[in-house]
Structure formats: structure tokens, C-alpha cells
Amino acid sequence: MNEIQTFNFKNSGVRTFVDENGNPWFCAKDVCDILGYKNSRDAVSRHTKSEGVVKRDLVKTLSNGRQQGFEMTFIDERNVYRLVLRSEIPDAEPFQDWVCGEVLPTIRKTGSYGTPQPPALPDFTNPAIAARAWAEQYEKNQALQAQILLEAPKVQAAEDFLKSDGDHIIRKVAKALGVGVRFLYDWLRQKKIITKFNEPYAEFVTRGYLRPVPSYHDGHDGTRKCDLTTHITNEGIFYIWNRLKKEGHIPEGRQLQLEFLKEAA
């Protein structure tokens, strides 16, 4: 797991880390404080799902210089949304917009949240070099701003998709990811996400990534049979996408093709 990083929402710090699969986790107490919950433990217990809650051991330095270990609770992105929906303070919606529109897109692109660093100053002892350096930096900034504007609708669509409920057959998910159907089945089996019979492992059902869908038919002996078809949830698609990208199976620059998920089965 990556180191704890703190960023600010209206001068309130929120501690966060990104796990080995690229998923962001938020300090539950920090989120609850911002959203007006008086008792963070009670809020987490009542309003979040346990599969999106983890404990992490941290170390703090005391005033006397000694270090002391303590445990901190972190929640995943979906649980942040659940707390936002139940908050009664005016800042709840701006906080959600900030997380969705600024923090998460940055984390998913860079693996961390950070403030852009100012460009290095050119050598002012040489006016020609200084002018050329500033011109180049200006052009880069303009291109970056244009790219951000271009990507904004895609980022928003992805965030809206993630927050919605839904599940999809593996064949359609493979098309959305831009990989072969056989490759995706083999990869899911290799990673112990589905069994050799294409049924989901319980761990990934519990985490909300997979959903077993029963189908019934009459067997040759006249009895009623039930088969399970594995569907991948919207959240599961992003989980698989991030793992495939980390392993180098997704080329740099490729985007999720969410429109394939809307096709008729």
C-alpha cells in the first residue's frame, strides 16, 4: 500500500491512501468530520457497508519525540458516497463534487493526489533562452488545459457510471475493456476471480465486484436445474480495468468504451 497522503477540502484535512490495485481509500473520521457526523464510529457502522471498510495501523510522533502506534479506519469510494447521501449539512454536495471532479480523476491518472508544481524558472541571465522557455511552458499549459476540457465529459460519465447500480455479462465487459472475450475469461480464472466453471468466488461477490445470476431449466431427468451466470458490476468493471492497466494489458491512452455495455445482450 502507498503512504498516507493528506489533502484539503476548505481547510479540513482528509487522509487517504491508494491500495495495490489503484483503489483510493479515505479516512473515515476525516470524512465524517467534514460531513457533520458527531460520532464517526456510529456513522460508519450505520451507513456504510463492511466490505468497503478497512483498518490500517499507523504511527504518530508524540510531543516528547517518541512514536506511538494507532489504528485508523478507512472507507472506500462507494462508502464515501453513502455518507454524503445521509449528511444533512450544506457542504455535503460540494464535498462530493470535489471528490468526484478533482480528487478521483487525479488519483486514477497518477496514482496519488497532489498539487501541480510550478514550472521551473528559466535562466534570466540569457533573455533569449528565458523567453523561449516561457513560451514553451505556456504552450504546454495551454495544451494541458485543452486536454482537461476534452477529457472532462469522459471523466464525468465514468464517475456517473461507477455510482450507478448495474451488472453485465462478461462478453460485453470484454468489449468495453477492449480485450478479447477468451482472454478475459482466462485472466479472471488465473486471478481466482471466477472458478474454472465460470462461477464467481465469494470474496469478489462480497466486495461488490461480481454478481451471480441464476437461470433455471428442466434437466434430462425432468427435474428443475439451476445454473449460475457470472455478471460483473459497474464497480467490478473499474476494479478489473485498473488491474489490467497495472499489468500492462491495457495500452496507454485507451479509454473504457462504456457504450458497449448498453448493447442488447
Image (cartoon, rainbow, N blue to C red):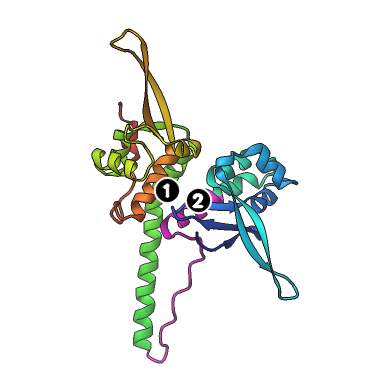
**Number of numbered discs present?**
2
Residue type at numbered disc 1: Val
Q: Earlier in the sequence, mark 2 or mark 1?
A: 2
Tell me the quarter of the picture where residue 177 sits: top left
- Mark 1 — residue? 155
Was residue 112 drawn as part of the magenta stretch in this picture? yes
Which residues, given as a range, are shown in magenta? 98-126
User: Where does the image place residue 24, in percent across and percent down from the top left?
Assistant: 51, 52
Residue drawn at x 67%, y 52% is: 29
* Above or below, 217 relative to 42: above
The residue at the point 67 percent across, 48 percent down is 32
Whether residue 41 sits left or right of residue 233 in the image: it is: right
Q: Which residue is mark 2?
A: 101
**Local SS, label 1:** helix
Q: Between residues 66 and 102, which one lies in front from this camera angle?
A: 66
| 65 horizontally vs 198: left or right | right
What is the x, y in percent for residue 101?
Answer: 50, 50
Q: Residue at x 70, y 45 (%)?
A: 41
Q: Quadrant of the C terminus?
A: top left
Cα distance in 3D space between marks 2 and 1: 8 Å
In the image, is residue 44 part of the stretch drawn in magenta? no
Q: Residue furthest front?
A: 221
Q: In the rendered view, tell whether residue 95 sits above or below residue 222.
A: below
